[in-house]
Amino acid sequence: MTLRVTLLGTGTSTGVPRIACDCPVCTSDDPRNRRLRAGVRIDVVGDGAGETPGTLLVDASPDLRAQALACDLRRVDGVLFTHAHADHVHGLDDLRVFNFLQGGAIPLYGSAATLAAVRRAFAYAWEEGQEGGGKPRFDLVPVDRPFRALGREVEPLPVRHGGLEVTAYRIGGFALVTDVSAIPEATMARLGELEVLVLGALRYRPHPTHFSVGEAVEVARRLGARRTLLTHLAHDVDAAAPAVELPVGVELGW
């Protein structure tokens, strides 16, 4: 089994640069400090029995159109939603282009609560009425246990984002855990022996609903993935000068 993972964006909800900010990171010309909202593309190469080549997304940020153009995204076979906050779902309408190209509905996977919120936010997609330029077509697929997508087992895992439960995902040796402030021990036990971990870290100061960079580094040390990429980074974090020493195998995603 081969997966190719692309970080479509590694920024927090405001993106970096942040609107109307003249701080050193927001005015930096370092491409690592230009962060679209967080999202991931997973390409299944399909070299194993029963696998189907194709592409999954994790979340659909408001920057999805720009992300799709930047990485030459040509198809979407499903979206794994972590939760329904605006910076993770508000690019959903951009997927209607793939409805046109592929001639069918796109499955949306997530917890029942997340998908209910998505349906409320994009109610027009399910309502009878004028099509205009076309409405997106989706199949809502609630998941709370391992399921298969493109022939691969996908394991949804609960983590905490402040008072909200959000969904992390593991596919083989890859896992994504974003918008996280605490990981239950049962989920920690399911995140061992990873090749690549994408892990949320917001800033250096503590935050009530996100790991700080230091907290994320400690979790990364404990899990021991071969490579850990930190994501959902705010403009507090300068890629050229991390304020916390990053151990070997842990890096700022971009």
Image: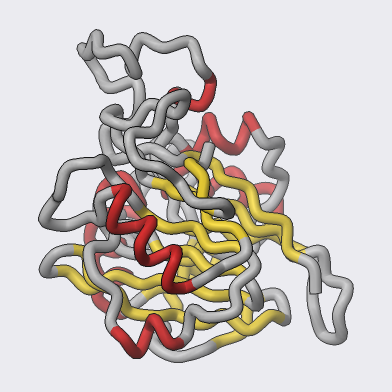
Compared with residue 105, is residue 49 higher up or lower down, i.e. above or below? below
Q: Image point 22% across, 73% down: which residue?
A: 165
Question: What scheme was used to colour the molecule?
Answer: secondary structure
Q: Please tell me which residue lies in front, 203 or 68.
A: 203
Residue 17, image x, y percentages: 34, 20
Residue 232, image x, y percentages: 36, 45
Residue 179, image x, y percentages: 30, 57
Q: Is residue 24 left or right of residue 153?
A: left
Q: Is residue 44 left or right of residue 240?
A: right
Tell me how many marks there are. Answer: 0
User: In which quadrant of the rendered view does residue 106 lie?
Assistant: bottom right
Q: Please tell me which residue lies in front, 134 or 4.
A: 4
Q: Image point 71% across, 58% down: which residue?
A: 43
Q: Please tell me which residue lies in front, 93 or 79.
A: 79
Q: Please tell me which residue lies in front, 229 or 69.
A: 229
Residue 186, image x, y percentages: 35, 90
Compared with residue 126, is residue 248 higher up or lower down, i.e. above or below? above
User: In which quadrant of the rendered view does residue 221 lie?
Assistant: bottom left
Q: Which quadrant of the figure contains the N terminus?
A: bottom right
Q: Is residue 171 left or right of residue 15?
A: right
Q: Image point 83% across, 70% down: which residue?
A: 46
User: In which quadrant of the rendered view does residue 87 lie?
Assistant: top left
Q: Is residue 105 visible?
A: no
Q: Image point 42% across, 58% down: which residue?
A: 199
Q: Is residue 236 visible?
A: yes
Compared with residue 224, is residue 9 higher up or lower down, i.e. above or below? above
Q: Is residue 42 left or right of residue 176?
A: right
